[in-house]
Structures are given as C-alpha cells and as structure tokens.
Amino acid sequence: MRQIYMDNSSTSFPKAPDLGKVMGEHIDQLGLNLGRGGYSPAIHLEQIAVETKEKLCDFFNGPHSRNVIFTSGATAGLNMVINGLLSPGDRVVTTCLEHNAVARPLHALSTYGVQNIRWERLPAEPDGNLDVDAFNKLLTTDTKMLLVTHASNVSGSLVPLCSLAKICKERNIFFVADAAQTAGSQPIDMKGLGLDGLVVAGHKGLLGPQGIGAMILTDRLASQMRPTVLGGTGSKSDLLDMPEYLPDRFEPGTLNIPGIVGLNHALDFLASQGLQAIRSHKDALARTFLEGLSVIHGVQSFGQAADVPRESVFSLVFKNMDQAEAAFRLERDFGILTRSGLHCAPLAHQTLGTFPGGSVRFSFGCFTTVADVDAALSAIAKIAKS
Ligand SMILES: Cc1ncc(COP(=O)(O)O)c(C=O)c1O
C-alpha cells in the first residue's frame, strides 16, 4: 500500500531534495565549530551561517541579517521572546488559537504569579475568524506585546496580521508573529507589516531539518529583551555580561551547524520553486479537499472556507467514532498518515468546539498531490460511512 503523508503541520516530509546528502557531507567533511577558532574552515562556516541569515532576512523582508537569531525551533524562539521581554506588571495579548509553545510559557508567567503578568486573549468565531475589533477593547497602557500565531495549526485559519499591525503601531505595542505554520507557505513581509518579531521553525514549510529555527527581531524589540540563555559566544570573552549586540546577545553556545547548512540548502530549493507557485498549489489542493468534504456525510470539518485565504491544515471530526480510531483506520486501511487528538493547542480546540475530543488533522505540504487528496477523500468517505 502506498503511504500518503498528511502531517506536514507537524513536520514537512519529504524535505528539500538532497537535504540529508548535503548535511551528511557537511558533518563528514567539515563538522567543525564556528565563531570560535580563527582557522579558515571555521571562517568558511561562519560565512555559511551569515549567508543563511541573509537568505532568511530576504525571505521575510527582515530588518538586517544580524537581527536573525538561530534557535532550535519555534518553541525556543517564542520562549525567548516571552520570557525575555515581559516584566512584572506587563500585559500581553494573544489570540485564543495559540499553540502551547505560546500558551504554556504565558500560563506559567501569568498563573504562578511571581511576575504579575496579565495575559488576555482575542476571541474568535468557531470557524477561526478573529474578532479584531475586540483588540481595541483589551488594550490598556500597560499592554506590552501582541503575540499571535499567523495560522492556527488546528484549523488552518489565518490571523489578519495587517489589521492588527496597524493598531499595534498606533498604540506603540510590540507586535510578534508565530509563523511556525506559515513560513515557507505564506508570504510574510516583516517590514511591510511593521512586525517587531517573527519566529519560525526550519523543519516545517521551510523544508529544512528538525532542530533549527530562527527568531528575527527589530532593534527596537531586541533592545528591550533580556537574554534568557547565557553563555559563551566566542566574542567579548573578557566580559561576564552577554555582548550587547546582535546576534551574539541571543546566540550563546555551539549552534546547530548541520541544521544551518541544511536550512541554507532548503532555502535555495524554496527559492527555485517560488513561494507563489507553492501557495497556488496548496490553495488548489485546499479547494479540492473542501469541495470533496462538502458532499461527505458523517464528518464535520472546521475552519474557514476555501475561498478565504487559509493554510492547508484541516481538522475533521468523525461523528461515529473516536478520532484516534479514525486516524488508526486511515493508516491501517489506506496508508494515510494524519494526526489525531488536541494538536498541542487546547485553546484552539476550545474555540472550535472540539475540546476535549480533538480532531483528525490533515495537513498538506508542497509535495502533496491531487491524487493524494483524492485518496484521502475516498478514505474519509468510507470511514465516515462505516
Ligand atoms: C503554531 C505553532 N507554533 C509553534 C510550534 C512549535 O514549533 P516547534 O515544534 O518547531 O518548536 C508549532 C508546532 O507545531 C505550531 O504549530
């Protein structure tokens, strides 16, 4: 039976062609450190890291390549922003669709009380549409940051960054987006939107390996953030304080250099395909999937319609069975790999009305084909009828 991977929201697969080969060659032939020794191979690696940052900066129209900080993934970047920026008495606003990478650090800060941080959430309709007007009502003079997921990893709904950015600018509030689900899939223009921070994972839509991600900060945001992980940077080694300048301030310790090499390679592949072509392909898949679902009984789908811009992530609830059972049968009988449960986003499930039972999530990647989507629709129809 042909295996059909439909869990690209978790991590993309396949990755950029030859990713393993490129990373393997790097480890075998040049697996040294950078930013430490002054010998030429180390300097060469430093150049690869800077080049990767330049590519990320161009891709997201960030402020400057030195403002790109490598992280181990989106979770690490989000924790660095949350714990590095917020101080006692601050208020922070998110959506009610956030992943636990945002929700758990904020819950810890706001609930355990040590820091007296207030966390408010923008409400959304069950289809994932945010009530942007509610943002104005939640704002106070101590609102420090708006931190929003760009797309829900449960419903695929897109958060309207543009309208929120306008309000943040007027009110002088830091605006940060969690683009774990959209980087490499939706156009993101940091400068155009006026984003102060953007957090991305390298292993999802960017088609790179696990263990590498990035956080891009404006100088304004970076200057207000404390580093939360401290250590050696290979620079200013006479000081016990972290260097003040970027990226060193937020990049202590040995970096994931094989991951950087892999991400560099994956960014080249993405550039060769073109983001617009990837987007059009995924939009076409989304239309096919949602049209097909509309005539299948016994299964409910959540999130926005296909004619509204969305991410190709879909949550389904099979009415006649447990969602884990449906996912099990999708794999056993049809070779279709999905994810069932709460997808690390209980708040989003509460919003959509799929808590605590969860959903079966189908998420398409740039290598998903129309034949894959047709096979999924046929499998869903059979399972829903049984
Ligand atoms: C919206 C969102 N934010 C953050 C994360 C965490 O990403 P990572 O696992 O790369 O740390 C995910 C992962 O699925 C996500 O979907």
Image (cartoon, rainbow, N blue to C red):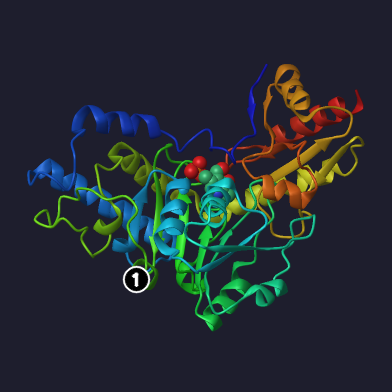
| Residue 351: x %, y % from top left | 75, 52
| Residue 349: x %, y % from top left | 73, 46
Q: Is residue 242 left or right of residue 312?
A: left
Q: Quadrant of the C terminus?
A: top right
Amino acid residing under circle 1: Asp
Which image quarter: residue 60? bottom left
Q: Is residue 84 left or right of residue 116?
A: left
Q: Which residue: 53% across, 34% down?
A: 13
Q: Residue furthest bottom?
A: 170
Q: Closer to the camera, 120 or 113? A: 113
Disc 1 under 8 Å from ligand 1? The reply is no
- Kindly tell me whether residue 105 is visible in this rendering: yes
Q: Which residue: 33% across, 63% down?
A: 67
| Residue 356: x %, y % from top left | 76, 39
| Residue 336: x %, y % from top left | 69, 26
Position of 302 relative to 150 (above/below): above
The residue pinned by badge 1 equals 219
Q: Closer to the camera, 75 or 203? A: 75
Which image quarter: residue 382? top right
Position of 336 relative to 73 (above/below): above
Crowding around mark 1 (Cα neighbors within 10 Å: few <14, some 14 to 19, many 20+) is: some
Position of 220 relative to 243 (above/below): below
Q: Closer to the camera, 174 or 156? A: 174
Q: Which residue: 51% across, 63% down?
A: 116
